[in-house]
Image (cartoon, rainbow, N blue to C red):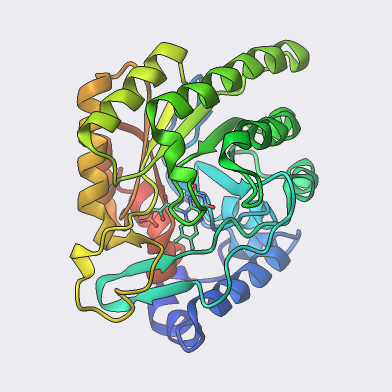
Amino acid sequence: MQFIPYSLYPTFIRPFLFLADAETAHGIIMTGAKLCSKRPLLKLFKQEVAYRPVTVMGLNFKNPIGLAAGLDKNGEAIDFFGALGFGHIEVGTVTPKPQDGNPKPRMFRIKSAQGIINRMGFNNKGVDYLVNNLKKRKYQGILGVSIGKNETTPIENALDDYLICMRKVYEYADYIAVNISCPNTPDLTKLQAKEPLLKLIKPLKEEQAKLQEKFSKYVPLVVKISPDLSDDMLNTICEICLEVKVDGITCTNTTTQREPIHGLEHASEWGGLSGEPLRALSNLTLQKVNDNLKGAIPIIGVGGVSNIISAKEKLNNGASLVQLYSSLVYRGPNVVKSIVDNL
Ligand SMILES: Cc1cc2nc3c(=O)[nH]c(=O)nc-3n(C[C@H](O)[C@H](O)[C@H](O)COP(=O)(O)O)c2cc1C
């Protein structure tokens, strides 16, 4: 039985959360979510959603809607988010060593546009802490782990960081997402260029083969890309992903573009823009990648999904799975049910 009527979130919970700044509100939610991840409390927060099974990358999802990376960076509330009805949860982005991220304030609500600008900078408690939480999870759905590099690691040595994370999480993850598109870690997005991408992805695929042997388990490798790439770069990325047999592509991370929110409060803050103002740009990237790949590699669509219409836009444009983050802030957990039930 669901004890909390999530449809009341916009009227009764959001106004209180929005009294605090965006990161404080996020902290309140995470503290509550961690607490509620414990049984028997979890039962009170469970949201029943329709069963809409899909098989993607050889994995069986109970529905195609997932939680995007960045909300539960340390995997501290997997069971809570799982109870909301997500078919998959992507935790992270995690780095080998813990790091504080950028100075605060670093998260801003663009309320009138239902958007968020963030420049968190991969604040996380490190891969060992995350792995500990992965071991404890009860959530039965698909669990993705997003991996990245520490800010202090020179970009030329990025591969080392991705390998450290990959080796540590492999046994406990259902898929691994390689985050090379966060605009808030210096030079990270440069890894999307031809040479650096090949030098990163090829060894990661080789490592995947070794780890498959070691653990007798194949964990798909997904690459998450930016919505700010030129057509040439998008084509090159698709080419490389096909060549090295990447298992999935996530379109997209946040954008550094500001046109959709020009003149609105906080529009001049630097960082990645997400939510409704990202939707059109993210969909365009998805369409271009889909036109290029023609179904050869599954696509995870993310960026501006807040209802059944925007979720279907992703699916109709070639995505096999859909993720969301910002709409959870604006619409609350009901967004998951309202999408899944109507698929
Ligand atoms: C505060 C915040 C932190 C994020 N952190 C990460 C991250 O660590 N790794 C990542 O791959 N994406 C991160 N993202 C991007 C989301 O996963 C997603 O790609 C993006 O927000 C677009 O989806 P949305 O419009 O539904 O929010 C973050 C987004 C936000 C708003």
Question: Looking at this view, is 202 or 297 the one in front?
Answer: 202
Kindly indicate the quadrant of the structure image that contains residue 148: top right
Question: Looking at this view, is 312 or 124 the one in front?
Answer: 124
Above or below: residue 276 compared with residue 59: below
Ligand 1 shown in quarter = bottom left
**Residue 280 location, x and y as percent?**
20, 51
Location of the C terminus by quadrant is top left
Location of the N terminus by quadrant is bottom right
**Residue 138 location, x and y as percent?**
72, 45
Q: Left or right: 193 with respect to 188? A: left
Residue at left 68%, top 71%? 31
Residue 331: in sight, yes or no? no
Q: Left or right: 44 with respect to 168? A: left
**Residue 171 location, x and y as percent?**
73, 28
Residue at left 33%, top 54%? 255
Q: Left or right: 317 with respect to 63? A: left
- Numbered label tally: 0
Kindly indicate the quadrant of the structure image that contains residue 74: bottom right
Residue 276: in sight, yes or no? yes
**Residue 198 location, x and y as percent?**
47, 21
Residue at left 55%, top 44%? 90
Residue at left 63%, top 18%? 208
Question: Looking at this view, is 71 or 123 the one in front?
Answer: 123
Above or below: residue 2 compared with residue 143: below
